[in-house]
Image (spheres, rainbow, N blue to C red):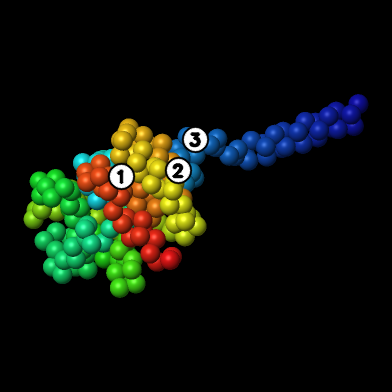
Amino acid sequence: MRTITSLVGATIAALALVGCAEEATPEPAPATAADDVATQEPPAEPEPQVFRESMGLFRATDPATAELVALLDTGVAALDLTLHVQDEIVVSAEPADGAAGSVDLRFFFDGDEDGLLAINVPEETLTLGDVEAQDSLSTLRGVFDVEASSGSGVDYVLTLTGEVPEAESADEERCGEEDELYADAEALADDPGAYAEIRERWTDSPRMWWAVKATAHSLAEYGDVSDSMATACAIYW
């Protein structure tokens, strides 16, 4: 009996020691919402949608101008614009607004100075057409922070913050579609409400879309087709 009692006592003592050891080991604290927040990376800023457009010669008859202005008013713009160098671009050595090395783009519309749209852009984002090589079309490409400006006739000052890759185009192939260009230009001149539908057919060819819009304006205003297709396609002929 004494031996059994001793064994029982030893067993109880051993269990007590195990219990103390278990109690002495602290359990990890449960994760909190604050811990989860601390370990999460901040969400990436969404990439701005690129506004790819061919800007026509005349504000009154080109809905793209209103779309551009609405975008600039948001303060951020990713642009890939096709422009007409002779009528829309003025290079400023010392712009009143904007940093050194910038140029002013001036969009003249129907000879109305009150309807002028002027934006200041970094020169590096502007690729000028080579007129001597029979190319009068230019491009403006980049992601910009935009500030409205009321000084010296400049409406917006654009600061480069990122790049926009050049999109593949079917300009060279579609410059053979003379009948299609004139048909859509006539349709647009007769029905400006068909703008979105017609634009959809030329999304892969910014030069030809510019020519469609310029030809439509010429038809509506002067009754002739002008030489807009030659302006857009001479580099391929």
- Which residue carries the number 3 mark? 32
For the residues marked 1 and 3, what is the alpha-carbon distance in whole angstroms?
64 Å
Q: Mark 2 Cα within 10 Å, few/some/many (few <14, many 20+)?
A: few
- Measured as percent of width and height from the top left, residue 10 is found at 81, 35
> Does label 1 or label 3 sit earlier along the sequence?
3
Q: Residue at x 30, y 73 (%)?
A: 132
Element carrying mark 2: loop
- Measured as percent of width and height from the top left, residue 68 is found at 28, 45
Q: Residue at x 49, y 35 (%)?
A: 32
- Which residue carries the number 1 mark? 216
- Measured as percent of width and height from the top left, residue 185 is found at 35, 44
- Asked whether, in this view, residue 99 is left or right of residue 1, the answer is left
Q: Residue at x 35, y 60 (%)?
A: 230
The residue type indicated by label 2 comes to Arg
Front disc: 1 or 3: 1
- Measured as percent of width and height from the top left, residue 161 is found at 33, 57
Whether the residues at callouts 2 and 3 have beta carbons within 8 Å, the answer is no
Whether the residues at callouts 1 and 3 have beta carbons within 8 Å, the answer is no
- Which residue carries the number 2 mark? 201
Q: Residue at x 91, y 26 (%)?
A: 1
Instruction: Tell me: residue 84, above or below residue 73.
Output: below
